[in-house]
Amino acid sequence: MIAFILADLRRFWSGALAVVVLIALSVALSVTVTLQERAVRLGSARAAEKFDLLVGAAGSETQLALSAVFLQPAPLPLMEGAVLSRLASDPRVELAAPVGFGDSAYGHPIVGTTTGLISSLSPSLAQGAMFSRLGEAVVGSDVALSTGAEIKPMHGTAETGGETHTAIAYKVTGRMAPTGTAWDRAILVPIRAVWQLHGMHGEEDHHDHDGEEADAHGGEPREHAESHEHEHGHVDADAPLDEHFDAQTPGVPAVLVKPKTIADAYRLRQEYRTGTTLGVFPAEVLTKLYATLGDARSLLLAITLGTQAIVIAAIVMVTIMHVGSRRRQIGALRALGTPVRSIVALVWGELFALFAAGILLGITLGYIAALVISARLAASTAVHLPVGFAPDDLWLVGGFAAVAALISIVPAFSAMRSSPAAALRA
């Protein structure tokens, strides 16, 4: 029986190949959507779990999380520096690290922060040492700069026509270990160097910009960005690091907070959800995004299923026509006494073999496509997106196989509609 099926498929190999390719493409679309949605969900969750609590100025929770955790450029309002001072001295807080944006170099964002945040992300550096002076920097694992390299910061990005700062050139002193987050593509410098470079001198200066939005990276008010370019004074690159924050601290777009306990995290979030500040759990924000992502996935899967139904209908019609063209052969087999069940099994097995081959090829193509998409996303975001199958996917494969088995019965029984004598006369 198997030898007969294989011989028949070789005889009509071009048509069989077309059927397999059609099935494979429709299955691959479903597999790609399923695997990619899961990869984005798992990858972003793992990246966000390193950040317990995020405090920023009142505004969009989603934008705050995307900018501070995933380093996506966006205008963020500045928050009073006194908030950072209170968080840093709060006994419930293990770490309060400010983040300041606005500059870039070699296509990588430059983020002003503290040594505490770097140690939290990478407990031990992969190379070199932590920065200890204002003119030093630590780079992420994906930044192609070696220890000792010089970094000239650019206000904004090259794509937006940014201007290179002349007041300071950072020197790379170390490299973080891979974190699987967007910070692997970042260049981290002392937050005070960012403040000095952008003419931010403290609470008095901050009040002049109160209520204004930050520039494209959330580091400096846009309205004063151009004027500050002329106000920048000399930044003493050799000045020792000072990570003490008080009421005169300049404004910041966000503060990454690591509470000591879960209870402290919830209390702090509630305390800083006021009219001027916003406290959010990045993981909670992602959950809301997952709901939207899940809706998009459902829509894509519905479109995919519709496409598969059209493909299956076309394949069944072509197969029935193919069986009709072989009525004489089937009639001869029946006239020679071949059992009906054997003929049904022959026709069913031939079509099911095509479905099975298409399903296996589609799963392979879908997996490869998801790997390629995830690799491209990871290259642009530095967030590792794990692509893999889960136990639940067995239901998806089983569903494909069950549908294939049922669909294959239709042409098989259509072959038995006419009598052997009529088939031989045709």
Image (cartoon, rainbow, N blue to C red):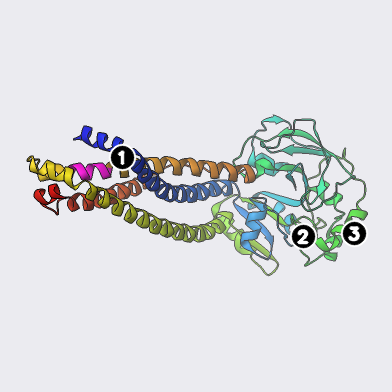
Please give left or right for residue 396 compared with residue 86 in the image: left
All told, the count of numbered labels is: 3
Residue extending farthest to the bottom is: 275
Please give left or right for residue 239 compared with residue 334 in the image: right
- Name the residue tied to disc 1: 12
Q: Of the residues under marks 1 and 2, which one precedes in the sequence?
A: 1
Q: Which residues are magenta?
A: 344-352
Does the magenta-highlighted stretch encompass residue 221?
A: no
Asked whether disc 1 touches disc 2, contact meaning CB atoms under 8 Å apart, the reply is no
- The numbered mark at residue 227 is 3
- Name the residue tied to disc 2: 214
**What residue lies at 49% left-to-right and 59% top-to-bottom?**
296
Mark 3 vs mark 2, CA separation in Å = 14 Å
**What residue lies at 22% left-to-right and 53% top-to-bottom?**
410
Badge 1 amino acid: Phe
**What residue lies at 28% left-to-right and 51% top-to-bottom?**
403
